[in-house]
Amino acid sequence: MRILFVTQGFESFVREDVDHLRSFADVETFQFDVNKGSRGASALAVASEALRQRRWLAQHLPGADAVYGWFADSHMALPTRAAAAAGVPVLVAIAGFDAIALPELGYGVYESWRAPLARYVLRNATHVVPCDETMIAHENRYSAYPDRLANGVRAHVPGFETPYTVIPFGFDPSDWRLGPAERPAVVCTVGHLGRERVQRRKGLDVFVAAARHLPDVTFQIVGVPDADAEAVRQRYEAGANVEILPPRPREELADLYANASVYAQLSRAEGQPNVLGEAMCSGCIPVGSPVFGIPGTIGDTGYVVESPEPRHVADVIYRALHEATPERRAAARNRVIEQYSRAARRKRLRALVERVAA
């Protein structure tokens, strides 16, 4: 089998899907890189990459059995159209940005000029592969609390009727050791946190505000470039109990998780956060916001906050710290192993691709 793989970037979950597909097929990859050089993610950059992509498709689409793309965005419009003309099925994996809109932060593809292209892709793909059912339909009761915001593909793509199959992200427990049962009173959160809009989407303001109510607890923010650390500290008025750390290579996160008692994912919008699953697999007690894939990942092994009110969030974190028994740490890890294994994603992805391609 020959599969054409199209993506904008090679995040860890994207690289893993390439590996999954290569376990049973020949895979040719194309990176639609609109951020290289000085062009930035502009309309001109998109047009330039589209020309390069057109030449690539002309060379590789003949004889292909399927096209597999990550995210419904401008980079998938031409492959979707060209594959349809050639009779080649298109599968599009979605995980957040292409299923979500937060008007207050200008976040989501539907808040940009690329919205019509994303809708075209989702309506005309052969099959959509969301990481969580909430990518299709969800009511966000947290980001604009107390208001409720309809979200998910059905809220942004009128007439969406494309078949879809939910396949969650997977984790390999051998990558994330359980860690000690007794841990210091440390609460951590991890992300790529260079931009203010990303920081607010990830709930950094709520995280720091909650820290002010628990001065004897260490709150670790991991993922802020050194050059931005002081600005973040001042922006959110972080106290002495807040540590702001630079991005870490993924292989170094295991030690960080193993030394934290609680992991907090207070995002205003999220797909199925990989860092949350990694932390749970490492025995952190999870605390999360009630949005998209976060509550489903946590299940009954942790806590979901009801609102972004800092005092309430601090109370929930305090409870998680004081109920962090060895049994609960093991339960968090076991949930990830049982519900979100990497082997299960690989198996289900192969079955779906072979069925659609046939």
Image (spheres, helix red, strand yellow):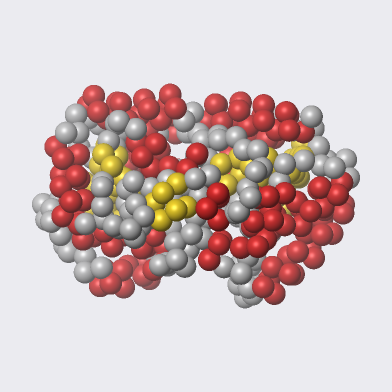
Q: Residue at x 35, y 29 (%)?
A: 333
The answer to whether residue 34 of the structure is visible from this angle is yes
Residue 113 image position (x, y, % from top left):
61, 69
Please indicate whether residue 276 sits to the left or right of residue 133 in the image: left
Snapshot quadrant of residue 334: top left
Q: Residue furthest left?
A: 216
Residue closest to the eye, 48 or 308: 308
**Residue at (79% x, 29% y) in the render:** 358
On the rendered structure, is 24 left or right of 260? right
Vertical side of 34 occupied by 171: above or below:
above
Position of residue 83 measured from the top left corner of the image (x, y, whole percent): 81, 48
**Image side of residue 96 versus residue 356, left or right:** left
Q: Is residue 228 above or below residue 352?
A: below
Q: Say which residue appears at 29% left-offset and 39% top-offset.
A: 286
* Image position of 180 (left or right of 322): right
Q: Is residue 60 visible?
A: no
Q: Residue at x 67, y 73 (%)?
A: 43
Which sits in the foreground, 186 or 341? 341
**Total count of labels:** 0
The picture places residue 335, in percent across and down from the top left corner, at 37, 27
Residue 256 screen position, x and y as percent:
32, 44
Foreground residue among 123 and 331: 123
